[in-house]
C-alpha cells in the first residue's frame, strides 16, 4: 500500500469504536470492516456527518490485505468492473467509509441498541449490561452470513 | 436402708403435692418399683429429690459441667403463679435403716423476677422413730452426720446408673478407667490411707535430710539423690494426672463434636455436594470466561461471509478476464506502444493510421492494462480466492465456539439451580460449616494421640524413677553398713521409710484384692446375665492393671474387641452389680439401686436375665423406664419374679408439669406396648 490515510467514521461513533475495541472484537479496522460488509449487503451508503475534525478513527495501514481485497471487490462491482477504479486507495476508502457508516446504523439497530446509551449525542457502550455482548455480537454476525457459506459442505 | 415414702411439694416438674410410696415398713411385699414415663417427664427428678433430701446437694454427677445455680429445683409454674412473691417447696423422705424409721425433710423457698430465679434452702428436720416406738428429733446441726453414718456421701453416685454411665463403662477408654478407678477408690475408702502415705513421705524426707547433715558426704549425696528422685516421682505422678485430665477433656470434646456432626449428618452431605458443585461451577465459569475472550477473535474471520456473493461475482469476473487472455495480457502494452511509435509491426508490415493493422493494434491497446493494474488485480484474485476457500471452515469454527459457549452457559444455569436447591435444603447460608467441625475433630484426635504418647512417656519415666529409687535405697544401705552408722535419727528415718514402703505395698495389695473381688463378682453377674451363646464363648470379666475392664474368652484370652454392643452393656451392668455387691461385703446391698433406662441395647434374653438377677442384689431396685424398653414381655417377666411391688406412671399435665399416678400392676401390663 502507498501512503497511510486516516480512515474516518462519524464523530458520534468515536466512543463506541473505543468501547467495542478489544471487547467484542480486536482493533478498530475490524469493526470498520464488519460495518462495511453489513452496509454493502444492505446497499446502504451514508455520507458522514458531524464535526469533520473528529472523524478520523484509524490509519489505513492497519487494514489487512484481505479487508482491502473485500473493499476493492466492492469498488470493482460499483464501477462495473473498471479495473482502474481500484488503483486509488483514497477514493476507495471514501466510498467504503460511506458503506461502513450505513453499516454501523444497521448494526446499532439490529444488534447493539440494547447495549448502547447516548450521551450528548454520542453513543457509548453501557458496560453494566454488556457482559454477554461478545457472544451476542458474534451470533448476530453469524446470522448475517450468506446461507451458501453454511451449505458449502 | 430401704425407702418408704417420698413426698414432694412444688419440686422440679412436680407441681403442688406429689407422693411415691416405695414400700411399707410392716409389709414390704417385693422390692422392685417401676417408675414409668417418657423422656423429660421427671424420672431423674425423683432421684434428684432423694439425693437433695439426703445430702442437700442440687447437682448430680450426670449434670456434668452445669453449675449448681443453673439447676432449678422449684417448680416453674408455681414460681410464675407467685411472680414477685415467694414460693415454698419441700422434699420429704421416709426410710427405714436398722429398724429405725427416719423422716427427713428439706424446705426451700424461691422467687422469680424478670425471668431470674432466686433460690434459698430454708431448713431441714430429721426425726428418728426407734423400734420401741419412741421418736427422737435430731438436732439440725447433727443431721448431716446422722445421714453420713447411714449412707456415706461419697458413694451416693453409685445409687444411680443411667444409660449414659452404662454406655461410658462399655468404652475401652480413659473415661472407663477413670470411672472404674473412682468406683474402686470410693468403695475402699482409701483417702485416709493416701493421706498417711503423703505424711510419711514428708516425714521420711525430713529425717533423712537430718541424717545427711550428720553423716558422710557420700551418704549425704545419696540422700539428696533419693529425695530428688522422690520429688521427681511426685512431679511425674502429677504430670500423669494432668495428662489423664486432659485426655478426659479431649474425649468429652470429641464426643460433643461427634454428636454435633451426627446431628448435621444430612447437612454435611449437602455441604459436600455444595462444595463439589461450587468447584465445578468455578471451573465452568472460568471456562466460559476464556471462551468469551476467544470469541472476540471470530467476528473478523466471518465478516467476509456477509458479502460472499460479491466476492464470488468479482472472482468470476476476474476469472473471465483470465480465460479471455486479458489478464494477464497476452501482448505486453509497452510492445504495442513501441509498434505504434515506430509504425512498423514485428512482422515487418507498416502500420499506418487508418489501415486495418492500425485499427487492430489500437483495439489490443485498449484491452491491455498497465503492469501495476494487472498485478493488483491478480493479487486481488488470489486474496479473494483465499477468503472464499476459508469461508466454510471459519463458519464451522464460529458455529462450534457458539455451541460450546451456549453449552457452558446451560451447564452453568443448571449448576446454579442445583446450588440454589441445595442452599434451600441446608436452610440458611450462615449455618455452621460442618467441615470446620471435621477439622476440629481431626485436631482433637491428633491431640489425643499426642496425649497418649505423653502418658506412655510418663509411665516409662515412672518405671525408670522407681528402679533408680530402689537402687538408691540399696546404695544407702551399703553406705550405712560401710560406715557402721547407727543413730537415733537414722533409726527413725529407716523406720519412717519402711513404714511408708509398707503402706504403699498395702495400698497396692488392697487395690489388687478389691480388683480381684470385683472381677469375681462381675464375672458371676456376667455369667448370670449372658444368653447361652455368650456363656459358651465368654468366661469372665477382669479389672486390668490400668483399671480397664476386659472380657476373657473360654481360653482366657482377651476378647473385649470382639463382643457385641449388647454384651458390652451386660459387662457394664455386671460391673455395677459387682460394685454394689462389694460395697455390701458380698451380702445384699443396703442401699436402693436406681437404674435409669438400662435395657437400651439388650436383647430380650439379656433383659430377662437382668430382671431375674437384680431384685436379689439390692435391698430395693427402682427401675426408671420408658415405653420402648419396658414392654409387656419385660413386665410379665418382672411380675413372675414376685419382687415387683409397685408401679408409678409419670404423666404430663396440661401445663407441662408431671403428675405421679399409681397403677395396679395387672392394669399396668395391659397399658404397656406388646412389642417394640
Image (cartoon, rainbow, N blue to C red):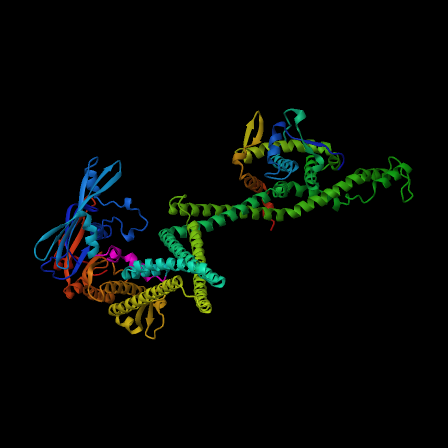
Residue at the spot x=24%, y=63% of the render?
B583
Dividing the picture into quarters, in which one does residue B88 lie? top left
Q: Position of residue B547 (x, y in %)?
A: 34, 63
State whether the magenta stretch is mostly helix, strand or loop: helix
Q: Quadrant of the N terminus of chain B?
A: bottom left
Q: Is residue A85 visible?
A: yes
- State the residue at coordinates (49%, 63%): B218
Residue B623 in magenta stretch: no
Q: On the rendered image, what quadrant is the C terminus of chain B found in? A: bottom left
In terms of image quadrants, where is residue A63? top right
The reply to whether the magenta stretch includes residue B156 is: yes
Image height of B528 relative to B365, above or below: below
Q: Position of residue A34 (x, y in %)?
A: 62, 38
**Residue B159 lies in what quarter of the image?**
bottom left
- The answer to whether residue B61 is left or right of residue A5 is left
Is B638 situated above or below B444? Answer: below
Amino acid at each position: 500500500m502507498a501512503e497511510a490515510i486516516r480512515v474516518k467514521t462519524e464523530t458520534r461513533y468515536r466512543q463506541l469504536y473505543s468501547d467495542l475495541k478489544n471487547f467484542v472484537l480486536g482493533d478498530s479496522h475490524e469493526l470498520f470492516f464488519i460495518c462495511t460488509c453489513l452496509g454493502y449487503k444492505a446497499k446502504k451508503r451514508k455520507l458522514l456527518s458531524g464535526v469533520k475534525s473528529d472523524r478520523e478513527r484509524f490509519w489505513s495501514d492497519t487494514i489487512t490485505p484481505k479487508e482491502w481485497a473485500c473493499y476493492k471487490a466492492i469498488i470493482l462491482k460499483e464501477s462495473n468492473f473498471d479495473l482502474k477504479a481500484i488503483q486509488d486507495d483514497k477514493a476507495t476508502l471514501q466510498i467504503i467509509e460511506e458503506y461502513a457508516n450505513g453499516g454501523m446504523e444497521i448494526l446499532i439497530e439490529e444488534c447493539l441498541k440494547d447495549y448502547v446509551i447516548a450521551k450528548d449525542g454520542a453513543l457509548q457502550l453501557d458496560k453494566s449490561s454488556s457482559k454477554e455482548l461478545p457472544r451476542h455480537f458474534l451470533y448476530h454476525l453469524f446470522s448475517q452470513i450468506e446461507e451458501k457459506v453454511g451449505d458449502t459442505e | 436402708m430401704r425407702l418408704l415414702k417420698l413426698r414432694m411439694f412444688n419440686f422440679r416438674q412436680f407441681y403442688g403435692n406429689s407422693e411415691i410410696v416405695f414400700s411399707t415398713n410392716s409389709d414390704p411385699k417385693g422390692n422392685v418399683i417401676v417408675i414409668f414415663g417418657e423422656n423429660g417427664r421427671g424420672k431423674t427428678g425423683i432421684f434428684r429429690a432423694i439425693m437433695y433430701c439426703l445430702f442437700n446437694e442440687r447437682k448430680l454427677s450426670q449434670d456434668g459441667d452445669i453449675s449448681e445455680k443453673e439447676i432449678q429445683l422449684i417448680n416453674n409454674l408455681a414460681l410464675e403463679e407467685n411472680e414477685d412473691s415467694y414460693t415454698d417447696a419441700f422434699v420429704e423422705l421416709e426410710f427405714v435403716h436398722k429398724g429405725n424409721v427416719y423422716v427427713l425433710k428439706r424446705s426451700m423457698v424461691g422467687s422469680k423476677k424478670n425471668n431470674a430465679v432466686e433460690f434459698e434452702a430454708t431448713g431441714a428436720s430429721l426425726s428418728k422413730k426407734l423400734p420401741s416406738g419412741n421418736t427422737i428429733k435430731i438436732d439440725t446441726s447433727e443431721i448431716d452426720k446422722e445421714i453420713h453414718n447411714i449412707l456415706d456421701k461419697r458413694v451416693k453416685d453409685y445409687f444411680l446408673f443411667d444409660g449414659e454411665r452404662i454406655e461410658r463403662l462399655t468404652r475401652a477408654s480413659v473415661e472407663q478407667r477413670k470411672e472404674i478407678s473412682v468406683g474402686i477408690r470410693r468403695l475402699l475408702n482409701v483417702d485416709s490411707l493416701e493421706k498417711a502415705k503423703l505424711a510419711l513421705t514428708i516425714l521420711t524426707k525430713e529425717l533423712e535430710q537430718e541424717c545427711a547433715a550428720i553423716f558422710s558426704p557420700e551418704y549425704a549425696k545419696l540422700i539428696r539423690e533419693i529425695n530428688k528422685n522422690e520429688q521427681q516421682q511426685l512431679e511425674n505422678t502429677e504430670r500423669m494426672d494432668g495428662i489423664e485430665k486432659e485426655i478426659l477433656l479431649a474425649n468429652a470434646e470429641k464426643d460433643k463434636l461427634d454428636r454435633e456432626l451426627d446431628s448435621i449428618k444430612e447437612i454435611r452431605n449437602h455441604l459436600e455436594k455444595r462444595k463439589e458443585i461450587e468447584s465445578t461451577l468455578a471451573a465452568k465459569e472460568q471456562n466460559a470466561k476464556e471462551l468469551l475472550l476467544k470469541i472476540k477473535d471470530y467476528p473478523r474471520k466471518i465478516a467476509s461471509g456477509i458479502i460472499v456473493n460479491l466476492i464470488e461475482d468479482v472472482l468470476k469476473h476476474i476469472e473471465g478476464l483470465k480465460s479471455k487472455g486479458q489478464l494477464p495480457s497476452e501482448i505486453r502494452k509497452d510492445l504495442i506502444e513501441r509498434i505504434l511509435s515506430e509504425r512498423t509491426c514485428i512482422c515487418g508490415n507498416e502500420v499506418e493510421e487508418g489501415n486495418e493493422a492500425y485499427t487492430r493494434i489500437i483495439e489490443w491497446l485498449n484491452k491491455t492494462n498497465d503492469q501495476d493494474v494487472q498485478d493488483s488485480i491478480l493479487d486481488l484474485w488470489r486474496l479473494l480466492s483465499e477468503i472464499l476457500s476459508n469461508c466454510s471452515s471459519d463458519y464451522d469454527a464460529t458455529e462450534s465456539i457458539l455451541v460450546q459457549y451456549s453449552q457452558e452457559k446451560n451447564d452453568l444455569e443448571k449448576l446454579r439451580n442445583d446450588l440454589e436447591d441445595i442452599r434451600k435444603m441446608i436452610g440458611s447460608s450462615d449455618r455452621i460449616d460442618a467441615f470446620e467441625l471435621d477439622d476440629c475433630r481431626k485436631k482433637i484426635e491428633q491431640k489425643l494421640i499426642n496425649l497418649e504418647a505423653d502418658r506412655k512417656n510418663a509411665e516409662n519415666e515412672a518405671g525408670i524413677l522407681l528402679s533408680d529409687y530402689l537402687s538408691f535405697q540399696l546404695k544407702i544401705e551399703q553406705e550405712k553398713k560401710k560406715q557402721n552408722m547407727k543413730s537415733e535419727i537414722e533409726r527413725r528415718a529407716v523406720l519412717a521409710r519402711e513404714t511408708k514402703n509398707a503402706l504403699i505395698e498395702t495400698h497396692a495389695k488392697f487395690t489388687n484384692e478389691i480388683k480381684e473381688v470385683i472381677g469375681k463378682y462381675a464375672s458371676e453377674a456376667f455369667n448370670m446375665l449372658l444368653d447361652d451363646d455368650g456363656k459358651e464363648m465368654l468366661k469372665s470379666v477382669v479389672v486390668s492393671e490400668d483399671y480397664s475392664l476386659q472380657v476373657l474368652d473360654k481360653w482366657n484370652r482377651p476378647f473385649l474387641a470382639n463382643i457385641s454392643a449388647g454384651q458390652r452393656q451386660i459387662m457394664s451392668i455386671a460391673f455395677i452389680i459387682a460394685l454394689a455387691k462389694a460395697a455390701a461385703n458380698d451380702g445384699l446391698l443396703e442401699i436402693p439401686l436406681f437404674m435409669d433406662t438400662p435395657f437400651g441395647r439388650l436383647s430380650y434374653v439379656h433383659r430377662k436375665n437382668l430382671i431375674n438377677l437384680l431384685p436379689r442384689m439390692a435391698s430395693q431396685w427402682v427401675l426408671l423406664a420408658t415405653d420402648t424398653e419396658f414392654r409387656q414381655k419385660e413386665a410379665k417377666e418382672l411380675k413372675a419374679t414376685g419382687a415387683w411391688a409397685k408401679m408409678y406412671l409419670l404423666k404430663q399435665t396440661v401445663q407441662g408439669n408431671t403428675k405421679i399416678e399409681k397403677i395396679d400392676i395387672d392394669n399396668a401390663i395391659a397399658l404397656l406396648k406388646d412389642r417394640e
